[in-house]
Amino acid sequence: GENVEQHPSTLSVQEGDSAVIKCTYSDSASNYFPWYKQELGKRPQLIIDIRSNVGEKKDQRIAVTLNKTAKHFSLHITETQPEDSAVYFCAASTDGGSQGNLIFGKGTKLSVKP
Amino acid sequence: DSGVTQTPKHLITATGQRVTLRCSPRSGDLSVYWYQQSLDQGLQFLIQYYNGEERAKGNILERFSAQQFPDLHSELNLSSLELGDSALYFCASTSSQLASETQYFGPGTRLLVL
């Protein structure tokens, strides 16, 4: 089955710097790669996603890149702000057959220091 | 607010007991997913239901079971509870059975087994 590895597990940056979180996946059939942000004690919330027919997607300060050949995808946050502090999860899924579940990475705790 | 509701918010019980967690999907969504999030762990997929039928199964223990009712709400039953079952339990919903559709998470139920 699918396995998703996420690095780093913790990341500390200064306000205004960029943050990059990387994930690798094992199943070459995976075709959907969302990123979720989870604040302490709250629900995961989708911040951006990318599908396998696209190499890059951007939404204001957030961008995601996908390298299908290398089976890795990355989240880039520019001009970080203290409110970006949270745990970020990557995930991958495959729509084949009856499989309809996301496999999540273990998360990256991002701290943005003012 | 994602439109997905979960009750109760908090649950404290003793080892060996049985509890039921409830999830109501967003209006119009037919699929419900259940996830377990233990302390410092990522989101572990448990099970998916689509329009009343089980569609995908993850690492769900035999002591756990779920069902989806005709009104599309779902219940996760946890029995013979152990200390290690203490966790946040989230449900998420989508309109289709495909995992490449954005999953909207509920606020979660925090279970504490003493």
Image (spheres, rainbow, N blue to C red):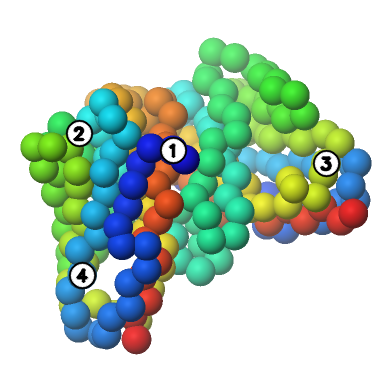
Residue B5 seen by the camera: yes
Of labels 4 and 2, earlier in sequence is: 4
The Cα atoms of the two marked residues, 3 and 2, are separated by 39 Å
Tag 2 subunit:
B
**First-in-chain label (1 vs 2):** 1
Q: Which mark is residue B2?
A: 1
- B5 over B112 or under it: above or below: above
B112 sits left or right of A56 in the view: left
Relative image position of residue B64 (x, y in whole percent): 20, 63
- Which residue is the site of mark 2? B50
- Residue at the top extreme, as displayed: A53
**Rendered-image quadrant of the C terminus of chain B:** bottom left
Residue underneath mark 3: A80
Element type at marker 1?
Answer: loop
* Numbered disc in front, either 1 or 4: 1
On the image, which quarter does residue A78 sit in? Answer: top right
**Residue B54 visible in the picture:** no
Q: Secondary structure at mark 4?
A: strand
| Of A5 and A62, the residue lying toward us | A62
The residue that disc 4 covers is: B19
Are marks 1 and 3 in one subunit?
no
